[in-house]
Image (spheres, rainbow, N blue to C red):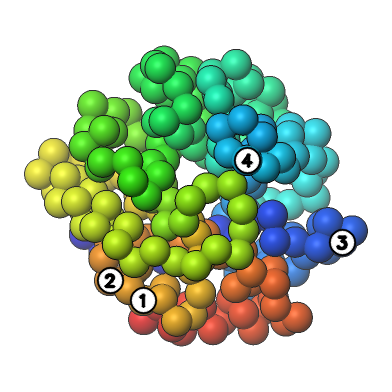
Amino acid sequence: MNKQLILSPSALSCDFSHLGDDVRRAEEAGVEYLHLDVMDGVFVPNISFGPCVISSLRGASGLVFDVHLMITDPIRYIPQFIKAGADIITIHVEATDDPAAALRAIRDAGVRCCISIKPATPTETILPYLSMLDMVLVMSVEPGFGGQKFMPDTLEHVRKLVRLRSELGLDYDIEIDGGINRDNIKQAVDAGVNVVVAGSAIFGKPDIAEAVRELREAAV
């Protein structure tokens, strides 16, 4: 199954004093999604931003808002992130005792739902939820901080997810997040990824449009 490559640059790597301008430049460069990492300092050892920032950006961007909740017990805040303008909401299977309930809350609100796994979490952990999903996010670094080095072993998750998708007759996207740049994006795409989160490889570059072009070219 060949799916079109979608780029989802991570706002965490923006210059927050010019957040709106950076997002606008990325949109003009042709990216499809904006990845918004929400961290609570509990599930991961860092704190980022919440619904207010997402709501502020929503009025300034037509991008698909790809909201990644790295928070404990995410079902508590799903309504707020939907109201803020999320188009996709990702929860972590490790962050809740009842992933199915959180996923149902997302789907029932008409928002695309995604589940994420950390590098060491067995792929099979999310098998019971695959039929509920629009996308699976494979973390290729330990979640919580930007700028980490890509872990190539995590591509085994991707390969298993491709195989399961075929065996089960499903159609979810496969996203990867962590350390992706022009040197390794082709590895991820060849393994079966079609949605790529890139932080410093896009927003960390002086010319965002050129960075987007280089990533797309490197993925082929």
- Secondary element under disc 4, as helix, strand or loop, is loop
Q: Position of residue 56 (x, y in %)?
A: 82, 41
| Alpha carbons under labels 1 and 4: distance apart | 30 Å
The front one of 212 and 32 is 212
Which amino acid lies under the numbered mark 3 shown in the image of this protein? His
Q: Which residue is mark 4?
A: 45
Eye-nearest disc, 1 or 4: 4
> In the visual, does 59 lie left or right of 90?
right
Quarter of the picture holding the C terminus: bottom left
For image coordinates 69% across by 68% down, the residue present is 203
**Badge 1 element:** helix
Sooner in the amino-acid sequence: mark 4 or mark 2 = 4
The residue that disc 2 covers is 190
- Dot 3 crowding, Cα within 10 Å, few <14, some 14–19, many 20+: few
Residue type (three-letter) at the residue carrying disc 4: Pro
- Other-residue count near label 1 (Cα within 10 Å), few / some / many at <14 / 14–19 / ≥20: some
